[in-house]
Amino acid sequence: MDSLSELPTDKNEKTVICKYISNPLLINNHKFDLRIYVLVTCIEPLRIYIYNEGIVRFASEPYYKDVKKNLYSHLTNYSINKKSEQFQ
């Protein structure tokens, strides 16, 4: 959506709204995300454990700011990108 006027008018329908990052950090012109797993076992004193392994996911197609309809360049979800011809 580009405008709040595009929101559904049904008051019973739940909606989540996020602001899109217009200038994302890219690696080789591809969007990516990092997953790092942590466990907080105590707040006071603060005790945090960080798992040694994480996950990095990349979009399967290059990101172009003006192309909004290409899910393969905007999303890093495996379930979506596995359908792209560029998926490796």
Image (cartoon, rainbow, N blue to C red):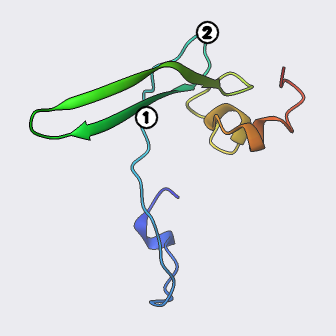
Q: Is residue 37 above or below residue 27?
A: below
Number of the label disc, if any, that sits on residue 28: 2
Q: Amino acid at mark 2?
A: Asn
Q: Amino acid at mark 1?
A: Ser
Coordinates of residue 77 in the picture (x, y in percent): 67, 39
Tell me if residue 70 can be seen: no
Q: Residue drawn 51% across and 83% down?
A: 13
Coordinates of residue 32 in the picture (x, y in percent): 56, 24
Q: Is residue 2 above or below residue 25?
A: below
Report the front residue among 48 and 4: 48
Coordinates of residue 48 in the picture (x, y in percent): 27, 29
Number of the label disc, if any, that sits on residue 52: none
Furthest-left residue in this view: 44
Nearer the observer: mark 2 or 1; the answer is: 2
Q: Is residue 54 left or right of residue 60?
A: left
Report the front residue among 63 and 40: 40
Number of the label disc, if any, that sits on residue 22: 1
Furthest-top residue in this view: 28
